Image (cartoon, grey):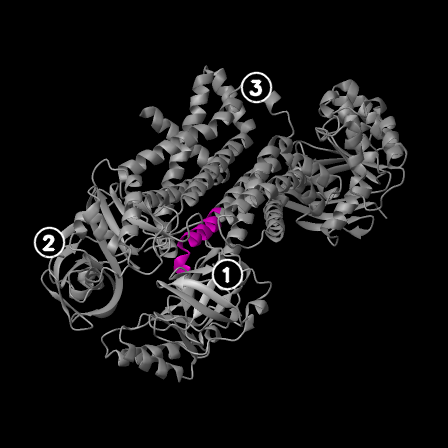
């Protein structure tokens, strides 16, 4: 203890004596530990998704795979309602099966009226999803029609501080729902995106409707199954496929096969269509871990570099201690203890910095990272990392500074710049690579958001239609007349999904192709600002389940069908199977490739018809002038036509699209953060290096100054050690970053090209930063380059 | 017109945040071709005066004219050019650059001149020859003796044919034999017309000068000329 006190006092005295060097050490190491902490918290959050649900390792989401056999299948998180029924009756290993059907309705209490996203839920839901409750009995909570279970947060929103249990929520149709249980608030790292669960036994529930009509088999609900202990999900999926083929009565978009995904793995499972929340990706976590390791290595090497910069002084000190009887092991221990104390101070800095940064990070990345959820394990892990870092950082310098003076001199005989070149090259390579990566990731982000859709998404709003067609008609008629509205269109699914209704099209050579069938109103393409590639648009809409007389196809479909050009496709007959019907339609127009899904998927062959029975969304294009006022008026019109019972669920297309790119957004934010941190760390390292080189070069610079060198000459002299490493770093970084980014871009079906521009800009920026840091230091230290070094005495 | 004209020069610098008056109203004229020795105890301001003459430091007060031109009115670049082309320095601890060879160290004396001289290599070889180091061109400073290192420094100072050579304790780190050799080279230089100003503690060296300036506490205490 006394030894530790003495060491701490010794380090403190060193810190005050050489505060500049220690400030660089603590700043660099503290920053690296902060980033490591944040990355660690993020990874912990990603890996613990849905772990708050009991038995999350044996509860599975049933994912359906659609498409043609022997072709890449499209996974979807939703399944037909019948899947649960078949599993309950014919798969005994499935102990419990429950469904969630996502809907959006207006609810009211005297305290609040709001349009709310909720689930119709099977009564046994909580036997499958073991969610923690704070009031009520979850086993029976959804047994009765008209019962509702909600979270504490929702209970507070609708009932304030009153006990919500037994109270009622009123729906837009004046149905009264009784609160039968209250759930503990969900953590943010859950795939569940709604906090209201209404009994599916209610007569007006869509689940009831589907259960009453076994031929209604379109994919509408999330199906969860709790398996008997020890049952492997792979054994169940084939049985489910067989049951599907036996029981199928619905339209022809039959799931080809199934996959059962354990809840604990769901968040990092490969992408699926119609997932509740955008998922993370294991590659992101791997990349983050790698980056954290690299940043720690930089900090480690920076520390080692700064200690080595002090070699002469420390060497003399060690020689003195040695003369006083200290052994090599004791000298090594002195340097390592000092390193440990500096790193522990850095850890405190990192903890404080993380505490301050987390609110901003949580807000900007839509996360809910908490530092002190399990303080003991956090402190234990960070202490371990810090100790390892302290030892690794100080080991090499310790060996050098504690070496006998002759050995030390031999080791240090190399000219300082040469000794440091490897490290400068590594730093520059990393910074250039990260800058290239940050630019390419940002460009891909911009591309995904602005270019990939293939239409102008600005000032475009999506509004889900009301269930009442008269309200929809009246709303449409009124907003079409508004001065601030540039156009209104209706569509089934579009622009929020690509995979709504497949259509199997027979190609010219007899091959069967999988198209997506989109139903849109005639003015859809005008509202989206899409000019037809050939032909004309749709003339009108129709409501009967008959073959559309006219259809439009996209350019991918033109190619898939083997037409030489869009013009050649016009007037041709399209034969296809959809809605259990063989249909023939005439191609009257071709539209450019537009994208209703993320860039993770290729644009599929599409057909567009005017079947209006199942239109789901309004698309409203608003004029930029007075946009806010127009939106207010639209909201009022909606409220008026719905009798004030249902607020509008309006969403800007850009916001919708951004929500679809949760993982990409995180990658953008993280790559920028990491690039910035690496640059700061490298700048700190570079400054340390400048201090070191200046210390070693100051006599030389003073001599040159005496011989007539002016500031520019001396600056060139300072810059000289950096040019060659910078050049080598570029030669190393360009192919390295190019290879990694090409791999990364390859994970997208559509991506930006890898052009030389980001590479050139990264190199220029790195050169400018390095030059700037050296220039700043040169200006700062110029006065000290002078005569005092040359004179002996006065 | 004197080559060096110093009028009422004061120089103050900070040491441990306390002002130190290194020079207190020094006035001194040095004619072209003169050999001046500046002597005095430690801390008397000799080296500061030499640095001001060499334009390495600027006086806090007073006027300094080099060959009639006010040094205060020169830009930093002009002062650097003055040092590069018209002033040569010799230091007590040689101040050679460790990682450059003898040849490269001497070439530094020409490196920063804007008026690039012709036949640089011949000039360097000639300077090496003058100081007796022609056979050591490719050696590093650490491979030379102290006397050889100082001769190398002298070669570097004279390679550009400066008007004035300023030597700060040039023999302070040498044994008597090497000291005599170095002083001989400097005297020889002066005899060919180069102005020479040396700072020294050694009375014998001062005796060889045409004028001895004795400093004490930042002031010129005595200036005596030797009769030719």
Residue that badge 2 annotates: A140
Residue appearing at x 37%, y 41% in the figure: A40
The image position of residue A428, as x and y in percent, is 58, 41
Left or right of B6? Residue A423 is left
Does the magenta-highlighted stretch encompass residue A673?
yes
| A4 to A92, vertically: above or below | above
Residue that badge 1 annotates: A452
Q: In which image quadrant can residue A391 be found?
A: top left
In front here: B219 or A525? A525
CA distance for labels 3 and 2: 81 Å
Say which element carries label 1. loop
Viewer-side label of 3, 2 = 2
Which of pointers 3 and 2 lies earlier in the amino acid sequence? 2
Residue range corresponding to the magenta coloring:
A658-674
CA distance for labels 1 and 2: 48 Å
Say which element carries label 2. loop
Residue appearing at x 52%, y 46% in the figure: A679
Q: In which image quadrant can residue A690 be found?
A: top right
Residue appearing at x 56%, y 39% in the figure: A427
Left or right of B110? Residue A225 is left
């Amino acid at each position: 203890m006394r030894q530790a006190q003495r060491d701490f006092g010794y380090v403190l005295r060193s810190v005050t004596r050489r505060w500049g060097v220690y400030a660089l050490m603590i700043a660099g190491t503290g920053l690296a530990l902060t980033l490591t902490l944040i990355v660690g918290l993020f990874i912990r959050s990603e890996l613990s998704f849905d772990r708050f649900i009991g038995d999350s390792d044996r509860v599975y989401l049933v994912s359906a795979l659609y498409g043609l056999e022997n072709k890449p299948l499209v996974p979807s998180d939703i399944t037909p309602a019948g899947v649960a029924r078949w599993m309950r009756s014919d798969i005994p290993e499935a102990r419990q099966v429950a469904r969630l059907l996502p809907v959006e309705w207006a609810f009211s209490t005297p305290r609040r009226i709001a349009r709310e996203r909720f689930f119709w839920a099977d009564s046994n839901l909580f036997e499958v999803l073991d969610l923690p409750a704070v009031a009520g009995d979850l086993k029976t909570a959804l047994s009765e029609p008209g019962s509702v279970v909600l979270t504490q947060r929702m209970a507070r929103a609708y009932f304030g501080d009153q006990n919500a249990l037994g109270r009622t929520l009123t729906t837009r149709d004046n149905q009264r729902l009784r609160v039968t249980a209250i759930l503990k608030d969900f953590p943010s790292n859950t795939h569940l995106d709604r906090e209201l669960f209404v009994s599916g036994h209610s007569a007006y529930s869509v689940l009831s409707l589907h259960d009453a009509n076994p031929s209604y088999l379109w994919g509408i609900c999330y199906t969860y199954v709790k398996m008997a202990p020890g049952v492997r999900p792979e054994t169940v999926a084939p049985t489910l496929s067989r049951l599907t083929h036996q029981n199928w009565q619905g339209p022809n978009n039959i799931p080809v096969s199934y996959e059962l995904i354990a809840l604990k793995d769901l968040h990092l499972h490969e992408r699926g269509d119609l997932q509740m929340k955008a998922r993370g990706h294991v590659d992101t976590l791997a990349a983050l871990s790698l980056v954290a390791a690299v940043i720690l290595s930089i900090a480690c090497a920076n520390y080692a570099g700064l200690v080595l910069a002090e070699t002469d002084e420390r060497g003399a000190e060690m020689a003195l201690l040695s003369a006083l009887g200290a052994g090599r092991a004791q000298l090594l221990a002195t340097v390592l203890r000092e390193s440990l104390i500096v790193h522990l101070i850095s850890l405190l800095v990192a903890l404080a910095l993380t505490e301050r940064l987390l609110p901003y990070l949580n807000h900007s990345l839509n996360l809910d990272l908490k530092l002190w959820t399990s303080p003991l394990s956090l402190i234990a892990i960070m202490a371990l990392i810090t100790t390892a870092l302290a030892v690794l950082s100080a080991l090499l310098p310790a060996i050098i500074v504690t070496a006998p003076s002759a050995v030390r001199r031999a080791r240090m005989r190399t000219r300082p710049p040469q000794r440091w070149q490897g490290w400068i090259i590594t730093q520059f390579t990393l910074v250039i690579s990260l800058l290239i990566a940050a630019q390419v990731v940002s460009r891909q982000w911009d591309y995904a958001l602005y270019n990939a859709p293939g239409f102008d998404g600005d000032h475009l709003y999506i509004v889900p239609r009301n269930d009442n067609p008269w309200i929809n008609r009246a709303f449409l008629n009124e907003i079409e007349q508004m001065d601030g509205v540039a156009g209104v269109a209706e569509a089934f699914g579009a622009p929020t999904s690509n995979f709504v209704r497949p259509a199997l099209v027979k190609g010219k050579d007899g091959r069967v192709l999988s198209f997506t069938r989109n139903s849109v109103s005639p003015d859809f393409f005008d509202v989206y600002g899409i000019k037809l590639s050939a032909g004309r648009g749709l003339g009108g809409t129709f409501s009967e389940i008959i073959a559309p007389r006219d259809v439009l196809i996209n350019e991918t479909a033109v190619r898939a069908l083997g037409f030489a050009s869009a013009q050649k496709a016009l007037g041709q007959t399209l034969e296809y199977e959809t809605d259990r019907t063989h249909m023939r339609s005439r191609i009257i127009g071709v539209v450019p490739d537009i994208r209703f899904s993320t860039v993770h998927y290729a644009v599929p062959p599409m057909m567009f018809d005017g079947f209006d029975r199942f239109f789901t969304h309004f698309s409203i294009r608003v004029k930029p002038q007075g946009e806010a006022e127009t939106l207010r008026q639209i909201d009022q019109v909606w409220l008026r036509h719905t009798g004030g019972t249902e607020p509008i669920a309006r969403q800007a297309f850009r916001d919708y699209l951004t929500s679809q790119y949760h993982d990409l957004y995180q990658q953008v934010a993280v790559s920028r953060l990491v690039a910035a941190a690496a640059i700061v760390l490298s700048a700190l390292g570079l400054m340390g290096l400048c201090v070191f080189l200046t210390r070693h070069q100051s006599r030389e610079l003073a001599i040159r100054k005496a011989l007539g060198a002016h500031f520019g000459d001396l600056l060139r002299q300072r810059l000289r050690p950096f040019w060659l490493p910078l050049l080598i770093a570029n030669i190393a970084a360009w192919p390295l970053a190019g290879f990694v980014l090409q791999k990364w871009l390859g994970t997208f079906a559509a991506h930006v090209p890898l052009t030389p521009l980001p590479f050139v800009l990264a190199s220029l920026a790195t050169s400018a930063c390095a030059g700037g840091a050296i220039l700043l230091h040169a200006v700062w230290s110029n006065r000290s380059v002078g005569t005092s070094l040359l004179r002996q005495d006065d | 017109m004197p080559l060096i004209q110093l009028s009422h020069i004061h120089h103050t610098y900070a040491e441990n945040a306390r002002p130190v008056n290194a020079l207190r109203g020094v006035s001194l004229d040095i004619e072209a071709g003169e050999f001046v020795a500046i002597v005095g105890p430690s801390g008397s301001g000799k080296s500061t005066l030499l640095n001001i003459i060499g334009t390495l430091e600027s006086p806090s007060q007073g006027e300094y004219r080099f060959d009639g031109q006010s040094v205060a009115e020169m830009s930093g670049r002009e002062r650097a050019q003055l040092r590069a082309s018209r002033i040569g320095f010799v230091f007590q601890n040689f101040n050679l650059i460790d990682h450059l060879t003898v040849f490269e160290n001497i070439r530094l004396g020409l490196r920063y001149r804007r008026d690039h001289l012709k036949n640089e290599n011949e000039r360097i070889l000639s300077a090496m020859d003058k100081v007796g180091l022609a056979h050591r061109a490719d050696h590093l400073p650490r491979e030379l003796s102290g006397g050889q290192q100082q001769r190398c420094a002298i070669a570097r100072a004279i390679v550009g044919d400066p008007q004035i050579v300023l030597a700060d304790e040039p023999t302070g780190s040498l044994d008597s034999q090497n000291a005599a050799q170095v002083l001989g080279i400097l005297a020889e230089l002066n005899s060919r017309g180069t102005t020479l100003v040396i700072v020294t503690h050694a009375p014998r060296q001062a005796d060889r000068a045409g004028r001895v300036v004795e400093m004490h506490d930042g002031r010129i205490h005595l200036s005596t000329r030797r009769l030719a």
